Amino acid sequence: MDRKQKQAEKARPYGLLKPTALGKIPGRFQLHQEALPHLPVPPLQQTLDRYLLALQPIISEEELNHTQELVAEFRKPGGVGERLQKGLERRAKKTENWLSDWWLKTAYLEYRLPVVVHSSPGVVLPKQDFLDRQGQLRFAAKLIEGILDFKTMIDNETLPVEYLGGKPLCMNQYYQILSSCRIPGPKRDSIVNYAKGKKQSRHITVVHNFQFFELDVYNSDGSPLTTDQLFIQLEKIWNTSLQTNKEPIGILTTNHRNSWAKAYNNLLKDKTNKESVRTIEKSICTVCLDAPMPRVSEDIYKSRVAAQMLHGGGSRWNSGNRWFDKTLQFIIAEDGSCGLVYEHAPSEGPPIVALLDHIVEYTKKPEVVRSPMIPLPMPKKLRFNITPEIKNDIEKAKQNLNIMVEDLDVKVMVFHQFGKTFPKSEKISPDAFIQLALQLAYYRMYGHVCATYESASLRMFRLGRTDTIRSTSVESLKFVQSMDSPEKSDQEKADLLRRATQAHRQYTDMAIRGNAIDRHLLGLKLQAIEDLVSMPELFMDTAYAVAMHFNLSTSQVPAKTDCVMCFGPVVPDGYGICYNPMDEHINFAISAFNSCADTNAARMAHYLEKALLDMRILLQSTPKSKL
């Protein structure tokens, strides 16, 4: 690095200091982003062929014949498909990413069900051993320091660029997760981000006993507070919020988005309330100091914590100790359970987990000897004036939330028999292996397969989010049908298993390169709406509805930390399954709804465990064939 570069390095914005001389130079982040390729629009014929292939295992022959006719109509030269495709290609030329705005709106901001359970994922971190309340607050202080350490890398644009298969990834999501918040609207929500602009956020929100506090986390010279300073501030917050009879204002954020938007406008009519809400929205993140949960046996403890992270346990427990519209909420309970819940619109799981990995590592660092303490101002308690109308909104939100809490069936399963090293030793992708085990478990439970969603990252492209890996394939169906069939030899079954994992691997590679079918089909559909042409028959077809009804909604979110992410099902009769494959074990979180008589998270966990073990036995008992 030459002298000029070194000087430039020194002059880079550090924390909150904005350089004047360097203001006009685009940052490294910007230069990196601009070098990334644009998301392609896949060829129309290719998507339509692959769509028919994806439908094969999940619909009847009769339905398939009908859909083939609709596809033939749609793909005619000069027909509606070609017109919509051209529209998409034009959009791709004009925008940084033809999909990202549409996806943000349709998948998140226009989605009207509560973010709790239906959209926001939670993460369960390893249990901490707090001897007392001081242990809890000290850990929280260290965690906040870790967050600020990560924030410095974001502010200085020194965050290491991630790679996938030798290709650099879009880092944009990292720049969206701090100092941001979702705002409810009557038909569509929006996201505000205070990380950019002149006045950067200097505070976090801390919640204890349903009471919100503004905690400044920087000294006047712009340096972040130390663990010791943060600990003292958290202790002040704790001691001034011991009353437990407060109205849980945060419960309002758990409601259906339209109801919450109404209540939000109502809440903001009052000047004090408006200031308090804005302070929460502008904060870097939220830290929730939770009350302990009722004690449970060891085998259901992790599942209970997963539910805690997703919804807070209901109005009697910690659900009021949240502001669910806040992008990042770290949760630390008195009993040592901890984790986080995040609002999904700005980011996928991997950047959140990378941030968590960084923080968890940071909390293990030994304390550094500190300089003498300067007295710090009292953290500001956020006041709310509760009118009878707002009280009524809170009561309604409590009722709705408690129904949701009762309905969520969640099971965390730690599969101890093997981890990702086993499939690797068989030269099989661990992800493909786990996805096939899910297919087998589902098939054994229900006697048929279903549309399965696995998220694939599109971060090789500028502003890329996700596409769908359709794990149910012609090959996976052949394998699961053969598995318990006496007609097939073990060798045949093992060959079918290997073929199915290869098909999964191929679909995955295709998806991360921007060639999957789901977002393209969605784009064509949205293009039709934008062009105000009548909706093509193809999208009104029952087969399309079946293809989009994901009874299995799954995601692999690998982490260095021994944690697991969890989320709710996306359909009333489905499962939400997230997993983190470690070297020698696999963490699974499985969710379902109690209101559906056909689904059961513990039963799915049981079948999944059996499928994984049976597949291992099968591979170990047969020689690797040359497929």
Image (cartoon, rainbow, N blue to C red):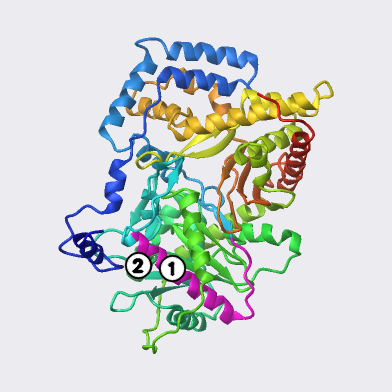
Residue lying farthest to the right in this orientation: 486
In the rendered image, residue 106, in percent from the top left (x then y), is placed at: 42, 39
| Vertical placement of residue 407 versus 382, above or below | above
Q: Identity of the amino acid at label 2?
A: Asp
Q: Residue 387 shows which numbered tag?
A: 1
The residue depicted at 71 percent of the width and 41 percent of the height is: 599
Residue sitting nearer the eye, 227 or 82: 227
Q: Is residue 156 magenta?
A: no
Q: Secondary structure at mark 2?
A: loop
The residue depicted at 31 percent of the width and 61 percent of the height is: 156
In the rendered image, residue 172, in percent from the top left (x then y), is placed at: 36, 49
Residue range of the region highlighted in magenta in the rendering: 125-154
Q: Are marks 2 and 1 in contact (CB under 8 Å)?
A: yes
The residue depicted at 63 percent of the width and 66 percent of the height is: 127
Residue sitting nearer the eye, 142 or 292: 142
Q: Residue 214: which quarter of the image?
A: bottom left
Q: Which residue is mark 2?
A: 270
Magenta span: predominant SS is helix
Task: Inspect this view and state whether residue 392 appears.
Answer: no
